[in-house]
Structures are given as C-alpha cells and as structure tokens.
Amino acid sequence: MCPQLYINYKLKSVAHLPWRQMSYKFLNTIIDDLFAFVIKMPLMHRISVFRDDVIFLIMLYQRWIYKVDVTRVNEFGFTGEAPLLDAD
C-alpha cells in the first residue's frame, strides 16, 4: 500500500482509488489484525501487522484531504465531467 500513498501524494488526487478497492484493503487490514492476536506468532510480526494499520490511516487521511479530480483522464480515456454538447 506504500506505493499507493506515494501516487496519491504526487498526483494530489485519489481519483484512481475506487471505494471498492479501499473496502477490500480495509477488510484485509482488519483480518490481519484479528489473526495477529489469535495465532501464536513472534512479537515483531505482530508489531509489523500494525504498520499496515498506520499506512491505512494515512490512506484515509489522503482520501479526506485530496479531492477527486474529475477533470483527470483515467486509464480508459474518460473523465468524470459531463460531455459538452454542441448546440449546432
């Protein structure tokens, strides 16, 4: 998830991060946390699981401060703006 943080920072936009993908990452983070407490594992591994939580919180913060840039063209060549209609 760290490369995603860098991409969000450089573009100053989160238009390329859909809510569905964010939901999957949230569920993955919660499941990792649960297993970190349920399964017997070394302490350093448990601490490294919480590193993902910090990154996820930063990702949520970026979602809050960077607005979705609807003028940016996505990978399919479309923008979020309504197409201009000619009055001819």
Image (cartoon, rainbow, N blue to C red):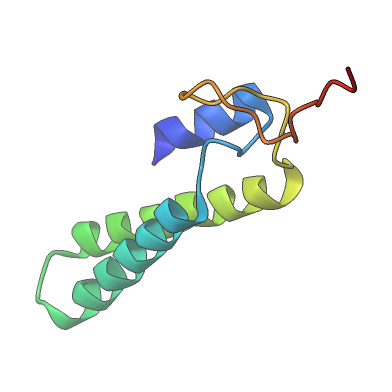
Q: Nearer the viewer, residue 25 or 6?
A: 25
| Vertical side of 71 occupied by 68: above or below | below
Q: Residue furthest bottom?
A: 38
Q: Quadrant of the N terminus?
A: top left
Q: Nearer the viewer, residue 86 or 69?
A: 86
| Vertical side of 60 occupied by 6: above or below | above
Going by the image, does 50 lie left or right of 65?
left
Q: Nearer the viewer, residue 87 or 62?
A: 87
Q: Residue furthest front?
A: 88
| Vertical side of 58 occupied by 42: above or below | below
Residue at 63%, 24% in the rendered image: 11
Q: Position of residue 81 (x, y in %)?
A: 74, 34
Q: How many numbered tags mark residues here?
A: 0
Q: Position of residue 23 (x, y in %)?
A: 43, 62
Q: Position of residue 49 (x, y in %)?
A: 30, 59
Which picture quadrant has residue 43?
A: bottom left
Going by the image, does 23 lie left or right of 72?
left
Residue at 29%, 54% in the rendered image: 48
Q: Quadrant of the C terminus?
A: top right
Residue at 17%, 82% in the rendered image: 38
Going by the image, does 38 lie left or right of 56?
left
| Vertical side of 71 occupied by 44: above or below | below
Going by the image, does 63 lie left or right of 6?
right
Q: Residue furthest right?
A: 87
